[in-house]
Amino acid sequence: MPSKNSHKTLVIVESPTKARTIERFLGDEYEVVASNGHVRDLPAKNTEVDKEHRHKVVGVDVEKNFEPVYVVPDRKRRNVDALKSASKTADAILLATDEDREGESIGWHVLQLIKPKKATPVGRIVFHEITKEAVQAALLSPRKVDEDLVRAQEARRILDRLFGYTLSPLVGLKIRQGLSAGRVQSVAVRLIVMRERERKAFRAAVFWDLKATVGAADGKFDIELYSVDGRPTADGNSFNSVGELTDQKRLWLKETDAAALVERLQSHEPWTVTKVDTSPGTMKAPTPFTTASLQIEANRKLNFSSAKTMSIAQRLFEGKDIGSEQVGLITYHRTDSLALAESAISEARLVIESQYGKEYLPDKPKVYKSTAKGAQEAHEAIRPTSTRRLPATIERYLDQDERRLYDLIWKRTMACQMNDARIERTQVEVTADGCAFRASGKRILFAGFLRAYVEGADDPAAELGDKEKILPALKVGEIVNLLGLGHVEHATKPPARYTEASLVKKLEDEGIGRPSTYSSIINTIVERGYVRSESKALVPTFDAFAATQLLEDRFADLVDLKFTAHMEQELDDVAAGKEKWTDVLKEFYFGQGTDGIGIRVEAAMKEAPYPTVDIGDGIVVRFGRKGAFLSKGDEDDRQTADVPDNVAPADLTVERAEQLLQERAEWTPDEGRDLGTDASGNKLTLLTGRFGPYIKVQAAKPRNVSLPKDIDTNEIDEALAKQFAELPRTIGKDITGAIGPYGPYIKQGSEYRNLPSWRELLSIDEATALALLSVPKETKKTAGRDLGDGIKVMAGRFGPYVSDGTVNATLPKSMDAETIDLATAIALIEKKKAAGPSTRKRTFRNRKGS
């Protein structure tokens, strides 16, 4: 489709970085522009559209076959105008948005907005890597926009809107404003809550065993008790979740039993080797990375959040300047395919032979097929665009996180095409006085893929030895010497909480959501306050418990794993052209007349009780405007106390709850420190209240003056106290200064300006105040330097920050808001996302309930 002479072909991609990379591969007859992601979307509020298009479900006319209403966000208008302008002078248009159904949808939306002339040829091209060869090959085979893929994406978007905008008001009403529900989000929350319920119901079982160290001719080794007089001893798998022995054939050793056994065996001889079993085995090479497995492994090995992994992968995909060229370093990172191109496999085999040796190379290339439920997006697995680019050769062009992720992808790609590892497993049994002890060993005979990639380690060479446990050479009948013997206590452990890695694995296994959405799902449930991250574990809050209880009670089908997976399959059927998208939406929203989500939510608004979480002994967790709190007793004699943010639901026992209630009942303010008197002779006292330090002015009408949060109360003397007692202070004509919820400020009429410190508030004069007030105040609409990819530098009350429209990250003092670049901004935002919501401890509130 390329044009000749002075004719121009307009190529539309999603991001400016991708545009810059592709521009280098194309000639002057091409113009490459970026849509900057989505160019339009459903409105967030009805006020964003005219009255004619305001519907019960914002942005969707459920009475007109679910016709969507789209708006162009203000921040996208300039971008859309640029696309329209470029398209007017183009002789041909190529949509080169990403190769998945979201990319297909973005391309379709761009076309709806630019409305090219009928005579202008329009084509859709796709490539799963941004290299010169891939882009030029794509130019030779343009196709039409796939309407089925577009409809599937639109159906998914509308379905999520029907679910979220219908159920979220119910969750907000019954629990707390600001909470939301989501088709996949609520199921993810439920999975985390279900695991926490298991932990809450769990009762540990304590059992004992014996461990010994014995010596043989070739060395010493450790053994563990396996059976006593022919009866196997209980281990951690022998008990249920409430601490009961489930396998009655096993012997449950208590401490006295174990101690008696130690005494019995301490002086016994001989200790004899009664069994030596040796068997060969293999460790299979891992599959290449998909989106889900990359997120899982990056979380496990690099401690990256799903969002951080996807952000870094996006940069590696779109292109990096590596000195001689700007090129994409990895293939498309949103995929559940395990396939690798033949050319990529051939290149990888050459690199394996040169880097590791011919013995590590299989006779035939390895071919992988996806087993994930609903696998789709049939492009390649994630791999380097060229495995000849060894991590060491390009590391100087990448930042630390980019280097680590590229290294992970490169090594995994090498490993998947290498020979399996060959191992030898050995099991030894040593018997003494009817007690059988066992030891297991493993020897690596041939490292195979382990030379390139060891799961759970960043340095394969250093960690390879840890994969082995070598026992000395032993023979049946050989006598060994007892070198040490003792009894050891064990306790069964509750089910582990989900981590991002294990949650992604569970969602993938159940066919819920799609790999490309997992990072946004996890981000959402953290930002909404349903989950907090603690040492990698995803810990649910009581809000999560309440929302899950509400949805289980009234909408059990909608948060059922099988139902959610079935909805994903239906959307896949729409993408494949097997089902009409409107039929899927009708079934979900209207049902059979009385069981549609709309009718059920209306009933629940009136009938559903406010959720509570039972702690026991008459104590429940209730939910008020400002969060979860404990409640005990009736309306006339009720005790309440805040639930600390750092207490997980499974860990809030009756005893802990009683302690919190008692502490709240006994709380009294301190007696304070005398600070002299103010200018009128009123006594000033420094006190610490539930909301921090303040000065009490004991005038005829006593009043309290809040102090700044960052002040050191030790430096407050009588002179400083007098200044604070004058707040709010008059600075000039109609100008006052005070300390508000967000810090010190000055005011003139309706104009406010924040001040950087309380010291400036106490010393500012009229001229300085007027100068500050004369500078126009930046607003969300007027402030901000656009860095691209929807990210801006903004001015805030606490200083400059960067924002992607959802998450805000304050700039460190060492960074200049005028010079910060896009990559640094993304890194700050990802760090903020990974940190989760604020862990600031809530103050106590005296409430009667909700």
Image: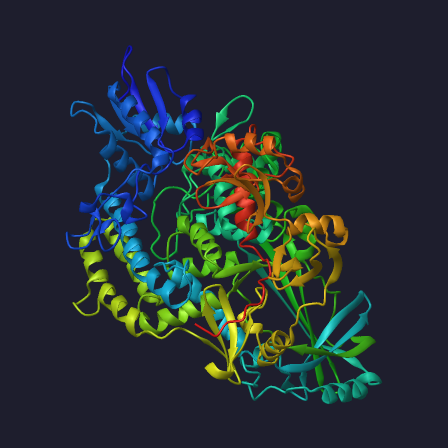
Colour scheme used in the picture? rainbow
Towards the viewer: 310 or 650: 650
Report the side of 273 relative to 614 (left or right): right
- As drawn, 375 above or below 253: above
Towards the viewer: 130 or 66: 66
Q: In which quarter of the image is residue 592?
A: bottom left
Towards the viewer: 724 or 277: 724
Q: In which quarter of the image is residue 735?
A: top right
Specify whether residue 422 is in view.
Answer: yes
Report the side of 484 relative to 308 (left or right): right
Identify the residue shown where x is 64% and y is 54%.
Answer: 445
Of all residues, the one furthest to the top in this rendering is 5
**Residue 79 locus on image (x, y percent):** 35, 29
- As drawn, 618 above or below 325: below
Towards the viewer: 255 or 462: 255
Specify whether residue 409 is in view.
Answer: no
Identify the residue shown where x is 66% and y is 66%.
Answer: 426
**Residue 529 locus on image (x, y percent):** 48, 59
**Residue 402 locus on image (x, y percent):** 56, 38
Classify the position of the C terminus by image quarter. Answer: bottom left
Classify the position of the N terminus by image quarter. Answer: top left
Identify the residue shown where x is 27% and y is 66%.
Answer: 601
- As drawn, 822 above or below 42: above
Q: Quadrant of residue 507?
A: bottom left
Report the side of 833 relative to 717 (left or right): left
Report the side of 831 relative to 18 (left or right): right
**Residue 557 locus on image (x, y percent):** 30, 69
